[in-house]
Image (spheres, rainbow, N blue to C red):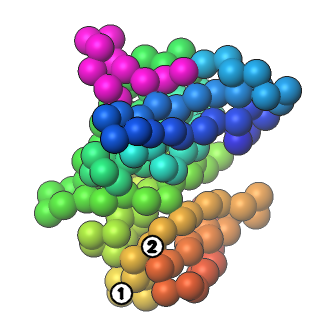
Amino acid sequence: SSHINGDLLVGMFTEDEGKVTRYNKTGTEIQNIQRDNKGQGLYSYPHYITENINGDVCVSDNNKHAVVVVDKSGQHRFLYTGQGSGFTPYGICTDLLGHILVCDDISNTVHLLDQDGQFLSLLLTPQQGVYSPRSVCVDDENNLWVGQLTNTVTVYKYLQ
C-alpha cells in the first residue's frame, strides 16, 4: 500500500503483459500503469511493488530481470538491470531517504540504489549469510528485515 495516501497498488499479469493498478481506500480503481509513452509494455510480471517518498512507483519484475520505476503519473523514469552477471529481483522497498532496496536472487545480495536508479552499493552479500533473499523492508526504527527462501528472516541495523 501507499505510504503517501493509503492507496493500494496491485500488480496483475497475463501471459502477454503486466500492469500495476492503483485503488483508493474505497476500492475504486484510480490509475492503470501499463505502457510507456511509445506504447511498449512496462511490465511482464509485476510481483513486488513499493512507492517511494517522491511518489515514484517501483516495481521488481523478476521475469523482466529489472526494477521498473515510473513517476506518480505513470510515466516511465528508469529501468535498473543489476550490476553485470544476471539479475533476478524479488522483494523491494524504499527508506526514509528515498533509497531503493531490492533483493537479487542470482547474486544472493540486496542492492541499494538512489531514487534515480543509480547503484550505490551491495548492502548485504552471502558473506553476511544471505541466501536467496525474497523479501525486504525497513521498519520505523531503521531495522532492515530480509526474508529468505530458507524460511528465515534476518534483521540488520540500517541507517544508524
Q: Nearer the viewer, residue 158 or 82?
A: 82
Residue at the image position 76 percent from the left and 21 percent from the top:
28
Does the magenta stretch mainly form a helix, a strand or a loop? loop
Task: Assign a secondary structure to mark 1.
Answer: helix
Res 67 → quadrant: top left
Mark 1 = which residue? Answer: 127
Residue 32 at x, y percent in the picture:
54, 21
In this rendering, position of residue 58 left or right of residue 61: right
Of all residues, the one furthest to the front in this rendering is 15
Q: Nearer the viewer, mark 2 or mark 1?
A: 2
State the quadrant of the C terminus.
bottom right
The answer to whether any part of residue 151 appears in the image is yes
| Disc 1: CA contacts within 10 A as few (<14), some (14-19) or many (>=20) | few
Q: Is residue 106 above or below residue 101?
A: below
Q: Kindly identify the residue that appears in the image at 34 percent across and 75 percent down.
A: 108
Which residue has dot 2 on it? 133
Q: Which mark is residue 83?
A: none
Q: Is residue 33 above or below residue 143?
A: above
Name the residue at 47% across, 79% down. Answer: 149
Q: Position of residue 124 (x, y in %)?
A: 42, 73
Determine the residue located farthest toward the left in the rendered image: 85
Task: Label 2, secondary structure: give it.
Answer: strand
Q: Position of residue 114 (x, y in %)?
A: 43, 43
Q: Is residue 113 left or right of residue 39?
A: right
Q: Is residue 41 magenta?
A: yes
Q: Quarter-wise, where is residue 104 in the image?
A: bottom left
The residue carrying pointer 2 sits among few (fewer than 14), some (14 to 19) or many (20 or more) residues within 10 Å by Cα, namely many
Label whose residue precedes the other's in the sequence (2 or 1): 1
Identify the magenta region.
32-43
Position in image of residue 60 (x %, y %): 42, 48
